[in-house]
Amino acid sequence: MNIKHKNKGPWTHRFLIMLFSVIMGILCFWLLGFVVNDIGSWPGPNYEKFEKELLDPGLIEKQKSLGDQVAEIKRQISAQSQRQTLLRDSTSSSQKTMNQLLEFQRLNLQKNVTPSAEEKQALAESQRRFLANQKQYQLLNQAIVQLNEELTHLEDGGRALETEIEKLRKPIKEQYYRLWDQHEFKIAMFKLALLLPLLLVTMVLFFKFRGGTYTPLIYAFGIAVVLKVAVVMHEHFPSRYFKYVLILTALAIVVRILVYLLRMMAFPKKDWLLRQYREAYEFFFCPICAYPIRRGPLKYRFWTRRTIKKMAPSSAEQTANETAYTCPTCSTGLYEKCSQCGEIRHSLLPTCQSCGNTGQRESARLP
Ligand SMILES: [Zn+2]
Ligand SMILES: [Zn+2]
């Protein structure tokens, strides 16, 4: 039989393989991420365009012109207020002048000095200006009040229109959200259409080449794909569904591992089996049924795995002739003649201890 011992190599080499596998995994994950993101950037439905198609353009136009009117009136009010402020300054200064002239005249009258015609005219002029200012101020006030009324009226109209438009927008928005959901679903399907075949390929590679030379490559790529699939599922499916996907996947993995372990127990692999046989031979028990191998000098002895170590072989035992031997309990051949050198060899171990022949395996239970 040919036992393949895996060549493990020095630890630096193993470490580098590990390191580069991890790097490869990360790079694969990134690459998949870029592709998936590009798919995700596919433009979805445009709400503005959508609304323009479905909403009465007249209403929007009306809303816009109302907004323009409101802005215009607000501008007028602010201009009038500014004028009013300037006027107030001018009024108060003309009032000051008038008061000064009046005071001057009163003092003159006390001194019995009659005011000159010029002085009288100046006073009259300042009084006239003051009154004119006052009147204009009132006019401005009226204008502002009127503008404010107009503004309130326009804003009321705008609010009513806004409510009306909102009411019309509601079904449009619902339809739009439905469209957007469809778009998201489509993108998720495209992403999965990319990832699931990759996942399938990885699985096929994994089961076909597992344990081969290029296993780390398959592992790195496979883990990257599996993680990306999980991320995409998480992004696109509500956590309610994702929870089930996750738990079912975990369950599948755990069941797979359990089945693997159970199968290993039921149908042991070569290495395992060989180890089991080797240990049984060491303690002189049948590797198949664990019945003591009472052959040659041990014919009348009695032992357990613990006591056999203390049993020193007698000189007679050391020189005893070897003979073929079959387990009396399970009828498995345990020692037999080597087909090459004719010496007695272990039937269930791979190599003849005398000649090193590894070919004779008819009676062995090794697969
Ligand atoms: Zn047996
Ligand atoms: Zn031999």
Image (cartoon, rainbow, N blue to C red):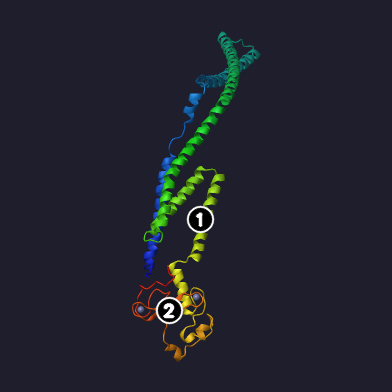
Location of residue 56 in the rendering, given as x and y in whole percent from the top left corner? 52, 21
Front-most of residues 342 and 258: 342
For the question of whether residue 219 can be seen, the reply is no
Front-most of residues 64 and 96: 64
Location of residue 118 in the rendering, given as x and y in whole percent from the top left corner? 55, 10
- Circle 2 sits in a helix, a strand or a loop, which is it? strand
Residue shown at 52%/54% (left/top)?
252
Mark 2 residue type:
Tyr
The picture quadrant where one finds residue 74 is top right
- Circle 1 sits in a helix, a strand or a loop, which is it? helix
From the viewer's perspective, tell me whether residue 194 is left or right of residue 113. Answer: left
From the viewer's perspective, tell me whether residue 356 is left or right of residue 301. Answer: left
Q: Which mark is residue 335?
A: 2
Residue shown at 48%/28% (left/top)?
50
Q: Residue furthest bottom?
A: 315
Residue shown at 40%/44% (left/top)?
35
Mark 2 near ligand 2 (CB under 8 Å)?
A: no
Image quarter (top left, top right, bottom left or bottom right) of the N terminus: bottom left
Establish if 250 lies above or below 139. below
Q: Earlier in the sequence, mark 1 or mark 2?
A: 1
Q: Write down the residue under mark 1.
A: 253
- How many numbered discs? 2
Image quarter (top left, top right, bottom left or bottom right) of the C terminus: bottom left
Say few, some or many: other residues with alpha carbon within 10 Å of mark 1 (under 14 / 14 to 19 / 20 or more). Answer: few
Front-most of residues 301 and 82: 301
Establish if 37 lies above or below 120. below
